[in-house]
Structures are given as structure tokens and as C-alpha cells.
Amino acid sequence: MRAAPPRFRPSGEAALLVALGDAIAPDINRRVQALAARLAAAPAAGLGATVPAYCTLLVHYDPAHLDYAGAQALVARALDALDEAPPAPARRVEIPVRYGGADGPDLDFVARHAGLTTAEVVERHTSRDYRVFMMGFTPGFAYLGELEARLAVPRLATPRLRVPAGSVGLAERQTGIYPIDSPGGWRLIGRTPLRVFDPAGEPPFLLGPGDLVRFVVDA
Amino acid sequence: MLRVDQAGLLVTVQDLGRPGYQHYGVPVSGALDAFALRAANLLVGNAPDAAGLEVGLGGLTLTALADGVWSITGAAPLAVTVNDQPRPLWTALYVRARQTLQVHQPAGGWAYLAVRGGLAVPLVLGARATYLRGGFGGWQGRPLQAGDRLPIGSPPDGRAPADLAGRTLAASARPVYGAAAVVEVVLGPQSERFHAGAEATFLASEYAVRVDSDRMGFRLDGPAVPPDNADLISEGMPVGAIQVPADGRPILMLADGPPTGGYPKIATVARADLPLVAQCPPGQGQLRFRAVAVADAQAKYRAQLAALRHIEDPDTWPG
């Protein structure tokens, strides 16, 4: 498939936003993450941190050293190089989950909503690999997709004030794990004993953009 | 070492932030008024990104446990005393062991306090800035309280305190802070979502900084400027981005704001003017926005950094 031409725009005077498409799709997202990886591996003078999202990459730059046109040229060159190199293989991460009960207070709701038994929801949730499309919301929170349509549920009308760290939730066609105790509106179906984010840990983050995640039942 | 004797509502350790973990969802954090922290550090001969203290409403009283060089910067009506004697702001001060340094902060702005050597708190994710919501960085991930004892690092070079004390940043090089600030912005990146009327309204109106604003962002009260379509696929955004949800009420993102967002952005505050925003007190402050070209915002930022060179070399400063 031919990739759509990139669209560049200023996001303030110290960052540029490059859009590689305008949809939530694995092939677009792979290019976004590959561009971020390329810029991180071969840092160009004046370019700074990048923030990959679903179909865009925000590239910070230092206006004391680069103007907008200069920053855009560096990112465009990295994009050209990208199309010649094969994509890096994704890292695979297995995440044990205790489903239902106090760990997953919304599992029954999800089952009713989908017209399935709770066992069938668990079986379906654990039956495919999810891609880390992007991270955000809180440190270490990975937006995982795509959830099968049958399991898609609306968010809570009133978010919980405190969702315990490790809780696994669903919202629309996404699933995710709360890294720290925080407010949250996703439907909780289980909880992992793994620590997803530990600021003093080595490494601090269990997941990164582009990883493939498989949930397994924690027996 | 310093000992905290009294701390107001929000005294935190801050540096210039941790930009390198935004792709993991970690906010940049760091000083809200980065210019004031940079200046405070340069005055005492530190690197500009050394860790200092950000002092909010209620001020701070501390005791120096060793001789050292300190500086305090920020917006009026801030004042500083050493053993109850008034001392100048934006100036390197020699403080003796067991002297008491007091930062009086009666209004809603921020003061920055730097000490020669910087605060030697542990690096967390590459920085010493406190991220309060995440509970990490700075001093145990929390605001300072009476009784805390913070370590001070070694000076970065061999300059004597006597050579540093008295250094100052000329008044003409300091930002002109105020509760009614005119702030330059770069429009976009979702200009197409705001029909011309909304953009014109945004630029022609005065916005009050709501009292429920914090280090994550300022909520603005004023004429609504709703986007034509408020659903945006989440994307990265810099500090200073002004998001507008469907209700049309702008939210100006600050240092502890998330690195990504799902609302259209009408504009982004120019870096050089973020200090003016940061020092605009919630519940009292009023902001007006003026659109500038990217190149103009960059020139202003470079000029602001150049003004700080005056500290090392006063002869270069024309004003």
C-alpha cells in the first residue's frame, strides 16, 4: 500500500506535528512509531523529544538552533529513509490477569452487554495480540487495540474516583491497564499483579509504543 | 543542606523538566516559569537546569546549614529577607550557615529559589522535577513541609562565593509580569476546526484564569469558542497548547499537563511568554492573546535567552 503523503504543521514555535494519515490503523501507526524510532536512533542536531500518537508524531525542536523549515527538512529526510528500511520486529509482552470478582467489578456488565458468558468474555479478551498504539493519560498507560467489536463497551457515565493500579479495563474498541491508582472511566474486567509503571524500576515501564500484548489468565 | 522551617501550600523541587519520557505518557513537569528558574540558577553560577525550589502562595522559611550563595526570582509582590533584613530579588546573595532565609509570597505567583550547587535530590526518569500527581521526582514526590532537610550539591566550578554574590539581572532584562497579561500565541494546529469567527473572538477577548487552575493547566473563563467538531484522534501537544472541548471553554496546558490530548487546539502560547501565563494568579489573572508568526515567536525566545547572558557578562547588555 502507498503511504499517504505526510502533512506538516507547526504546533507552537518549538514543535512540529507530522500526520501520516487520519485514522486509527495499525499500518499508519507502525510508520509513526518507526519514524519516532529513527529520530531517536540518529538524533539530528536541534531536534528533541518526540511524542508518537495514533497517526501523528509531535517532534519538539530547539528554536535557538533550528527554524521551522529546518526542522521540517530533518523530519522529511528521516521519513524518506524510513521507506527504504525494513520495520523493526515488535516486542511481545505477556500479561497475567485475574479476571472478575473484586479485581474486575465490571466483568458481569461486559458479559451482559456483549450477550456472552463471563468465561466467553475472558476467552475472547485473551485470544488476540493487542498493539500499543500510543501511551498517555497517566505515566505508563498504554492504549491497546484493537478490541473485537463484540466486546466494545461505553465508558462509565461517571468515572470512578479511584481505580487501583493494575486494573485492566475496556472502553469502545480499546483495552488498557491502569499503571497507578487514578480516577478512571473504563469498564474493569480484571487486574494484573505485574507492576506496569515503577519510576525507580529498571526499566520503569513494562510497555512501550509498538509492543504487542497478550493477556493470559493468571491461574 | 537546608532545613525547611515553614512551607506554604505548594513548595516543590523543580528543574527544567523531563522531556524525554513523553512517549510513555509522562508530563514534562519542571518550573512553570522556566525563565525565572534559569535566571536564578545562572545568578549563583549553576547550570540553568539545576534543581531549585518553586514557591507558591504562603511562602517559605528555611535555615541554611552551611555558607552558600542563593538567589530568588519571580513576580512582585514577592519579597525576600535574610535574618529579617530585606534583600534584593534577581540577585545572588551570600547567606551564612544558620541564617534564616524567608520568601514572602502573599499573592498567587511563583518564586524560584536557587542555591549554588543545586538541590541534590535523586534523578528520577532523568530529572529532579517533582510530578505531584505521579508522586515521584523532587523531594519524595511531594511538596516540602516543615522539618524536611534537603541536600545541596557541589558547586560546578571553583568560583568563590565573593565573586558571585551581588550579581544581578538588570531590571530591563526581566519579564514584565502582571495580573493582566497580553500573551503571544501561534495559531493552530487545528485552525480548520475553528471557523474564522471563533478565532477572531478568541483573539479579541479577555479570559479570566479560573481559581480551579493548577500546575496541569489553566481553565479560562470568557467568550466560548467551540470547535466545529470536537472529536480529534489523540495527538501529542507541547506545554502551552490551548485545547478547546465541545463546550468552547479553553484550557491552557501547563508543565504537569499530559503530553497528549484529544481536543482541538486553537493556539499554542509562545515559549517566551509562558512565564507571563504562569505568573498570572488563578482567581485574579486576566489573559489576552495576540497571534504571531512562528518565526517571530522563535526570535522572541532567542532574545529572551540572550538577555540571560548579561548575568555572566554585564558589558554585553545594551539596555
Image: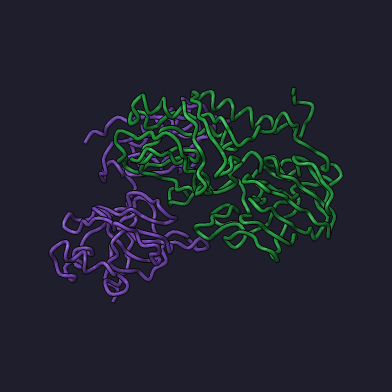
Q: Nearer the viewer, residue A18 or B8?
A: B8
A98 over A156 or under it: above or below? below
Identify the image quadrant of residue A16: top left
Say whether residue A120 is left or right of residue B196. Answer: left
Q: How many marks?
A: 0
Could you tell me which residue is drawn at 42 percent across and 66 percent down?
A195
The C terminus of chain B sits in image quarter: top right
Chain identity for the colour purple used in the image: A
Identify the image quadrant of residue A154: bottom left
Res. B307 visible in picture: yes
Say whether residue B48 is left or right of residue A59. Answer: right
Say whether residue B153 is left or right of residue B19. Answer: right
B48 over B291 or under it: above or below? below
Chain identity for the colour green used in the image: B
Q: Nearer the viewer, residue A194 or B251?
A: B251
Could you tell me which residue is drawn at 66 percent across and 43 percent down?
B37
Could you tell me which residue is drawn at 41 percent across and 25 percent down?
B200
Residue at the outermost right position: B162
Q: Please, which colouring scheme is shown?
A: by chain
B315 over B243 or under it: above or below? above
- x, y percent for residue A19: 34, 35
- x, y percent for residue B54: 64, 50
- x, y percent for residue B2: 74, 59
Residue at the outermost bottom position: A219
Q: Nearer the viewer, residue B247 or A163?
A: B247
Could you tell me which residue is drawn at 21 percent across and 56 percent down?
A152
Identify the image quadrant of residue B201: top left
The N terminus of chain B sits in image quarter: bottom right
Res. A44 visible in picture: no
- x, y percent for residue B197: 36, 25
